[in-house]
Amino acid sequence: MLTVLFLFLFSAVPAAILPAEAAHMQPYHFGFKKSKEHQPASINEEGFKDILMKHEAIFLGDTTKKELYLTFDNGYENGFTVKILDVLKQHQVPAIFFITGHYVKQEPELVKRMVAEGHLIGNHSWSHPDMSQISNTQLKTELDKVQAEVTQLTNQKHMTYLRPPRGIFNDRILGESRALGYTSVFWSIAYKDWDTASQRGWKYAYDQVMKQIHPGAVILLHSVSKDNAEALASMITTAKEQGYEFKSLEHLEKKTY
């Protein structure tokens, strides 16, 4: 009788932990409630706020200070990064470029220029997978390959910031990334700029970003966008006129959720 009872209890244990394990693995697509009238963006209703807080991911900086953090996703080169770098240099604005394996292999000179001009290189994975669907071993391989290539090319010998491809993540991935020494970086300003077949002109890009500006904002732009490249100087100039300061992500001192 005791043996039967033991077997019954033992067999019930996996079922008891399934809900927690499912939550650990549940994928999320990052989204947020956009800022209006310089008020901070919000993730209060997205269902993953606690996960970001748990793993100390970046969503917002200090919302009491008029600071902005400019981030670019560079999955591939579309001919606009030189102009973007020229504008950043002219206006003395730092940025971080999240690059893939494809980018670092195809555009080594641009990667070297980014670092030489004081920008950070962030990890956007080697092959741009849905990270929630790969193993921990595969995750490490994806990140290590990018870091090794950047280290070989540039003076940036450490890589500490990660942006999950397509903004897809789960509790496991953020935890494993953090264990590998990475801070996951999301954003509080963005618009649909990545579709190269749907560019609407520099003014559209400018308006989409400027109407979302708020203290502590992390701005996501895709470097493949012609509109972004043409609007960037005006974005920077107007933001500065409004009293905002652009800072490097490594100088983000307070995370807000």
Image (spheres, helix red, strand yellow):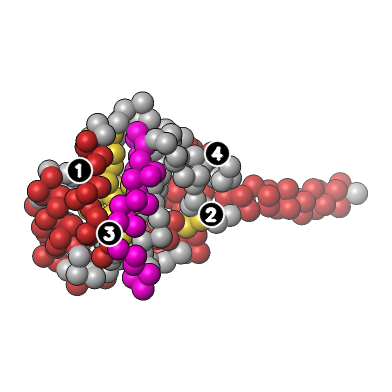
What separation in Å lies between label 3 and label 2 (alpha carbons)? 31 Å
Mark 4 lies on residue: 44
Q: Pinpoint residue 125: horizontal percent, then vertical percent.
A: 34, 61
Q: Going by the image, does 160 lie left or right of 7?
A: left
Q: Residue furthest top?
A: 64
First along the sequence among labels 3 and 2:
2
Q: Going by the image, does 80 lie left or right of 138?
A: left
Classify mark 2: helix, strand or loop. strand
Q: Hey, what amino acid is under mark 3?
A: Trp
State the residue at coordinates (85%, 48%): 5
Q: Hey, what amino acid is under mark 2?
A: Tyr
State the residue at coordinates (55%, 56%): 27
Mark 2 lies on residue: 28
Dot 4 crowding, Cα within 10 Å, few <14, some 14–19, many 20+: few
Question: Which mark is drawn over residue 202?
Answer: 3
First along the sequence among labels 3 and 4:
4
Dot 2 crowding, Cα within 10 Å, few <14, some 14–19, many 20+: some
Q: Which residues are magenta?
A: 196-218
